[in-house]
Amino acid sequence: MNEVEQETHIKSEFVEAIEETKWSQLPEFTVVTGFVKNLSSFYGLDRNKMVALLRRDYPPKPVTINPKPDLEDRKLVWKPKFTFLLGVLALILVVGGYLGYQYYMFSQPPKLEIFVPNEGQVIYQRSITVTGKTNQDAVVTVNNQPTLMHEDSTFKAEVNVDENTSKIEIKAISRSGKETIEIRNIEVELDS
């Protein structure tokens, strides 16, 4: 046995464990495979056949899995991929928010503020100038007659009245077709 140990550089106790198939006394499978190859060469046996026999007879060792890995080792590492994904997400949120706001504004009825006439105002002439303010893109009609919009979103319309006129209807229509209607009740007292 000493001769085998000197020639192969394998401890005699490992050689005996291989010969007696005492697998628990041997190191890792890869190391034992190296031992078998060296011993096969020493004894003049076919190395491939001896390794195949070892694979057949060597029992697999149970793999130990740590059920609770150390959480301290799992640190969040900031990577360029995270930065890119965060940037894309921020861009989507900004564009989505802007489009949502624009849709909301488009779908809302226009604001309408009337300066003249006041509610219950008494009119002494045959015409009245109706003035007010609305959204820039709205179309305004006064008693179903279109009015002219100014650049500052104000409008002005001249309306003829008679003794039977009791109200003035001002309507603002947005591009989406939404309407805002204001009705001013008036009293007409014309001098004969």
Image (cartoon, rainbow, N blue to C red):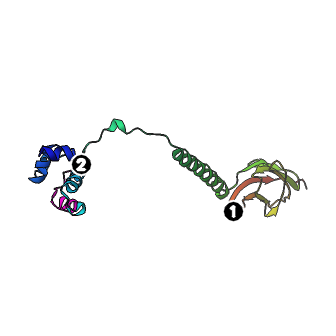
Dot 2 or dot 1, earlier in sequence: 2
Q: Nearer the viewer, residue 24 or 140?
A: 24
Q: Residue at x 22, y 59 (%)?
A: 51
Amino acid type, callout 2 = Val
* Residue 177 position within the rendered picture, expressed as x and y whole percent measured from the top left: 69, 63
Residue 167 lies in quadrant: bottom right
The tag on residue 58 is none
- Residue closest to the far top: 72
**Does 188 sit left or right of 1 as displayed?**
right
Task: Name the residue that disc number 2 marks.
Answer: 31
Q: Which residues are magenta?
A: 50-63
State how many labels appear: 2
Q: Nearer the viewer, residue 143 or 25?
A: 25
Q: Is 62 part of what is drawn in magenta?
A: yes
Q: Is 145 part of what is drawn in magenta?
A: no
Check whether the beta carbons of the residues at disc 2 and disc 1 lie within 8 A of each other.
no
Q: Nearer the viewer, residue 69 or 166?
A: 69
Element class at badge 1: loop
* Residue 11 position within the rendered picture, expressed as x and y whole percent measured from the top left: 16, 43
The local crowd at label 2, few if under 14, some if 14 to 19, many if 20 or more residues have their Cα within 10 Å, is few
* Residue 49 position within the rendered picture, expressed as x and y whole percent measured from the top left: 21, 64
The local crowd at label 1, few if under 14, some if 14 to 19, many if 20 or more residues have their Cα within 10 Å, is few
Task: Name the residue that disc number 1 marks.
Answer: 176
Amino acid type, callout 1 = Ser
* Residue 122 position within the rendered picture, expressed as x and y whole percent measured from the top left: 80, 49
**Does 83 sit left or right of 52 as displayed?**
right
